[in-house]
Image (cartoon, rainbow, N blue to C red):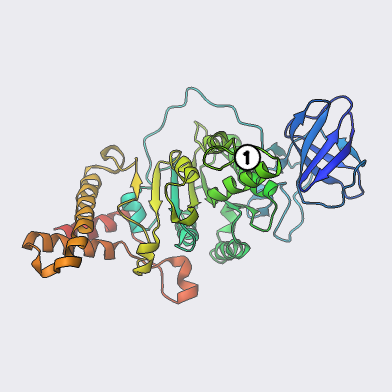
Amino acid sequence: MNNGSVVSIKDLIVRVQFDEGSPKIGEIIIVDNQHNTKLLVDHLEPGGIAICLNMRSDRRIQKGMPVIRTGKGIEVPTGSVTIGRILDTLGEPLDGQPPISGENVQYKDILKLPERSTDFTIAKPEILETGVKVIDFFTPFVKGRKIGIIGGAGVGKTVLTMELINNIAKSGSGLSFFAGIGERIREGHELWDTLRENDLLKNTCMFFGQMNENPVQRSLIAVAAVALAEYFRDEEGKDILFFADNIYRFIQARNELATILDQVPNEGGYEPTIFSDIKVLQDRLSSNEKGSITSVQTIYVPADDLSDPAVQLIQHELDSIIVLSRKVAEQGVRPAVDLNKTSSSLLTPEIVGDRHYLLSVQVLALLQKYESLRGIIAIIGENELSASDRADYAKAKKLIANFTQNMNVMEKHNGIPGDFFTREQTLQSIEEIIA
């Protein structure tokens, strides 16, 4: 295998000259500097120049150092040895336990796309109960589909995700994955603590590339987690619950890399390949005849602007969208869901049944009327409304209160026990209010 030498270094970008036998894009090459610094080949330039990314931000590289090809890409370990572990982008442990190694451990290239099945027929939709009223009613959690939790900073995206992991993973029917992308280290530790206390680590694989990591690792951590999820789906026929917090940070990390690589941004100010990057990642979070991947993705909204091009782009890939609102959070409603902006393409009679669907139509009509009446009440007062309008307004207020509930994962912080409602209990409580 032909080796090269370092030509120049600029921040995380290392240019390597190969006289013959250039490496492949996505290949790991190693700097022979006694520390075996790993570089990832990002792209190739004419004249045998490989533009590489410094995976670990290792500053112990100098111009002229020899570089050795490995012939391999980024590989993560697979199989049952990864369950209950916390890994980074390179498949190395972050939990203080020994590295995953051994003759029997198999590895998977995270950038290698799986074969797509062409004759896959979708089975009858299977609804998974989350125990969270507002989700089970407005955005039914259907096996093999994608849900997005959208909101600005501090409105409860991570808490809602942790509650879903806690409630759904308890059933133990599948395998849970968590990909921490560019979020706070504290939140990752709290999640690990919660899973450990509830004895859920035995069904969970975790990947963390939090905000302390460089953009190379943050942009690839979701890809590494998806690669392992694909292995369990395709080789072991498992049903996967895939949680990603936060998918917007994936785009932010790609943006930082694009800036370092001097790429011209697109019209929205984002990296030029934003569309294909999101599309490829979301397409891998899919189901086939062997198993399913059901994903829950949090999406940070910069400056609470839902019209942000990156947020809009991610939304188009999702089946259901839960919008968390600062305005609702300020009213003391938890979870702070904006019921009028939350939507789902899965809320159909074929999936949820006629009873649930007809109730949802009535509830949405009442909530929209409530919004329009609020402006009138602010001017003339509630007593000036007609009897029917007053009745509808009162029903809408009861419905909003009904969708408020305490979270199990917050019990250790506020001392208030959490609630779990079956879908039947949720429907019954709404019928009582409407009737």
- Residue 272 vs residue 289: left or right? right
Residue displayed at 62% across by 42% down: 223
Q: Residue lying furthest bottom in this view?
A: 415
Disc 1 crowd, CA 10 A, few/some/many (<14, 14-19, 20+): many
Q: Quadrant of the C terminus?
A: bottom left
Give SS at disc 1.
helix
Whether 348 is drawn above or below 246: the answer is: above
Tell me if residue 342 can be seen.
yes
- Residue 88 vs residue 279: left or right? right
**Number of numbered labels in the structure image:** 1
- Residue 24 vs residue 257: left or right? right
Q: Residue lying furthest top in this view?
A: 119
Q: Position of residue 386 (x, y in %)?
A: 7, 62
Residue displayed at 49% across by 49% down: 297
Q: Position of residue 135 (x, y in %)?
A: 36, 53
Q: What amino acid does circle 1 point to?
A: Ala
Q: Position of residue 243 (x, y in %)?
A: 52, 50
Residue toward you, 170 or 28: 28
Q: Position of residue 102 (x, y in %)?
A: 79, 45
Q: Quadrant of the N terminus?
A: top right
Whether 318 is drawn above or below 189: the answer is: above
Residue toward you, 306 or 139: 306
